[in-house]
Amino acid sequence: MTQKYHHVRFRWWNPVNLNVLSEELRPKYPVKSMEYTKDPTSLYKDDKQELVVKADTLTARLSMFRAVLNQEKEEQFTEKDKMLREDIHRIYTHDRPTPFPWSFNPEPKIK
């Protein structure tokens, strides 16, 4: 099974507060908080929390600076999927990891 929709969105300068975001999204979607093992020597030791948010066919994995949207198999987006996509685009406003004009990440066409 291949992923048919995969898109990454970013925030630049200011991280999202995942606890606040979880409370904002929880009335509309199931939200699961994930904690990963922290390596005290890692540059990213404070970035080991993630939220997993699910709509009908679309899943979003959210960290402080990045959102990864996935659809496991090709299906038409439902209204709830479209709503989740719009929410993620509102919160993670950029389609590349830096403000510099390289590393473009065009969004795949959606059905």
Image (cartoon, rainbow, N blue to C red):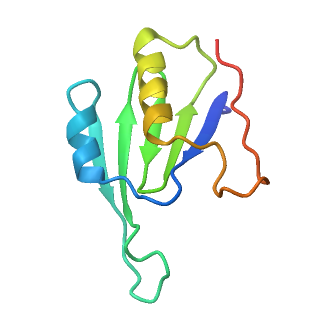
Q: Residue furthest bottom?
A: 41
Relative vertical location of residue 63 with respect to residue 94 in this rendering, above or below? below
At 23% across and 47% down in the image, what residue appears?
20
Please determine whether, in this image, residue 40 is positioned above or below residue 9. Answer: below
Of 81 and 93, the residue lying toward us: 93
Query: In the rendered view, would you say 91 is above or below 28?
Result: below
Residue at 64% of width from left, 42% of height from top? 95
Left or right relative to 81: residue 73: right
Picture coordinates of residue 47 (x, y %)? Answer: 41, 67
Which residue lies most toward the right here?
Answer: 102
- Figure label count: 0
Q: Residue at x 64, y 19 (%)?
A: 74
Residue located 47% across and 11% down the image: 78
Instruction: Where is residue 32? Give x, y as percent.
Output: 28, 43
Percent x, y of residue 13: 49, 60
**On the rendered structure, is 26 left or right of 68?**
left
Residue 24 image point, x, y percent: 24, 35
**Where is the C terminus found, in terms of image quarters?**
top right
Quarter of the image with the N terminus in it: top right
